[in-house]
Image: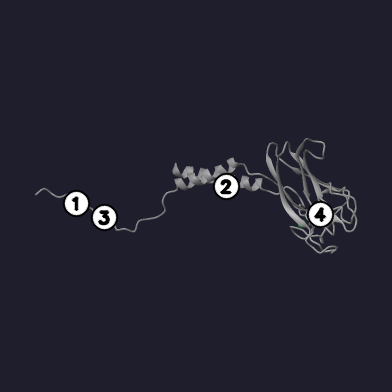
C-alpha cells in the first residue's frame, strides 16, 4: 500500500512538472527580432515605417525593432497570432525605449493590443499605451547614440484558441534636427502558472517524502537477549 502511494505521488510530481514546463513555453516567434528579411522581422506582419536595426541598441541578441527609423512619420505596426487556451492567463513581456539624436523632449509611444482570434476583429483582451521620453545618453548628433529601454509586463486572459498581439507606433512627430525612434525588443508571451498547480507540486513532494521509509540502519550492537531466570 505504501509503495502504491509513493508511485502515485511520484506520478503527480512528474505530471505537474510537465504541466508547468508546458505552461511556461514561449509562444511568440522571433520576439527578439534576430531574424529579418529585407529589413522586416520574420514571423511578424509588418506595416508602415519600421525596420530591424542592429545599430541603435538592443536588450537581447544583436537586433531590435526601430519604428519610424530614418526620420519618417510614426505609422508602423507589427502583429503576430499565437495559440492560446480559453480562460487561461498569459503574461506579455517586452522591452520598450527611445532612440534619440538631439531630440530630448519628443515622446516615443507604442499602443499594445491583444485581440481574440486571428486579426484585429475579435474582442480586445489587452489595451495598453506605453511611452518614453528618456533622452539618449549618447552624444548629441552621434550616430551610435544608444537607446534607453525599460522592461514592461502585462497580463491578459485568452478568450479562445488563437490570440493576436499588435504593437502600433503613436510617437510624437519628428521635429527635424535629428530623429528619434520608438524601439522594441525581447517580446515574450507565456502562460502564467496557476497557483493551484504550484500548490499541487508542493503537496505531492510532501506526500512523497512523508511516505518514504527511513533508509538508515542502526550501527548500535543489539541488546543481549535476556533468558528468563529459572526458579531456584
Ligand atoms: Ca533582439
Q: Is residue 178 left or right of residue 117?
A: right
Badge 4 marks a residue whose secondary structure is strand
Pointer 4 or 2: first along the chain = 2
The image position of residue 68, as x and y in percent, is 87, 52
Q: Are marks 3 and 1 in contact (CB under 8 Å)?
A: no
Q: Earlier in the sequence, mark 1 or mark 2?
A: 2
Residue 227 numbered tag: 1
Q: What residue is shown with label 4?
A: 65
In this rendering, the label closer to the viewer, 4 or 3: 4
Closest to the observer, 127 or 232: 127
Q: Where residue 103 sits in the image (x, y, percent)?
A: 84, 56
Residue 8 at x, y percent in the picture: 51, 43
Label 2: few (<14), some or many (≥20) within 10 Å?
few
Q: Mark 3 sits on what residue? A: 223
Instruction: Kindly report which numbered mark, 3 or 1, lies closer to the viewer in this rendering.
Output: 3
Labels 1, 2: front one: 2
**Marks 4 and 2, Cα distance to the nearest angstrom?**
39 Å
Distance of label 4 from label 1 (alpha carbons): 89 Å
Of all residues, the one furthest to the front in this rendering is 105
Q: Report if residue 35 is visible in the image.
A: no
Q: Secondary structure at mark 1?
A: loop
Q: Is residue 166 above or below residue 69?
A: above
Give the residue at x 11% y 48%: 231
Residue matched to label 2 = 14
Rendered residue at 23%/53% (across/down): 225
Evaluate if marks 4 and 2 touch, with contact meaning CB atoms under 8 Å apart. Answer: no
Amino acid at each position: 500500500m505504501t509503495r502504491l502511494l509513493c508511485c502515485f505521488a511520484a506520478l503527480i510530481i512528474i505530471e505537474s512538472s510537465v504541466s508547468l514546463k508546458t505552461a511556461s513555453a514561449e509562444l511568440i516567434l522571433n520576439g527578439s527580432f534576430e531574424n529579418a528579411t529585407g529589413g522586416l522581422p520574420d514571423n511578424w506582419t509588418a506595416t508602415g515605417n519600421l525596420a530591424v536595426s542592429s545599430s541603435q541598441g538592443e536588450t537581447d541578441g544583436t537586433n531590435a525593432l526601430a519604428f519610424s527609423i530614418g526620420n519618417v512619420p510614426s505609422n508602423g505596426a507589427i502583429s503576430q497570432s499565437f495559440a492560446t487556451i480559453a480562460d487561461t492567463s498569459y503574461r506579455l513581456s517586452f522591452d520598450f525605449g527611445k532612440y534619440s539624436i538631439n531630440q530630448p523632449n519628443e515622446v516615443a509611444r507604442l499602443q499594445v493590443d491583444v485581440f481574440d482570434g486571428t486579426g484585429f476583429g475579435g474582442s480586445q483582451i489587452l489595451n495598453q499605451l506605453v511611452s518614453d521620453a528618456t533622452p539618449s545618453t549618447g552624444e548629441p548628433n552621434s550616430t551610435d547614440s544608444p537607446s534607453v529601454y525599460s522592461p514592461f509586463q502585462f497580463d491578459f486572459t485568452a478568450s479562445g484558441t488563437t490570440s493576436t498581439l499588435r504593437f502600433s507606433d503613436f510617437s510624437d512627430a519628428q521635429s527635424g534636427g535629428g530623429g528619434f525612434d520608438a524601439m522594441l525588443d525581447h517580446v515574450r508571451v507565456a502562460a502564467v502558472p496557476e497557483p493551484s498547480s504550484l500548490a499541487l507540486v508542493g503537496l505531492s513532494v510532501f506526500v512523497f517524502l512523508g511516505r518514504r521509509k527511513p533508509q538508515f540502519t542502526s550501527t548500535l550492537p543489539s541488546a543481549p537477549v535476556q533468558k528468563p531466570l529459572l526458579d531456584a
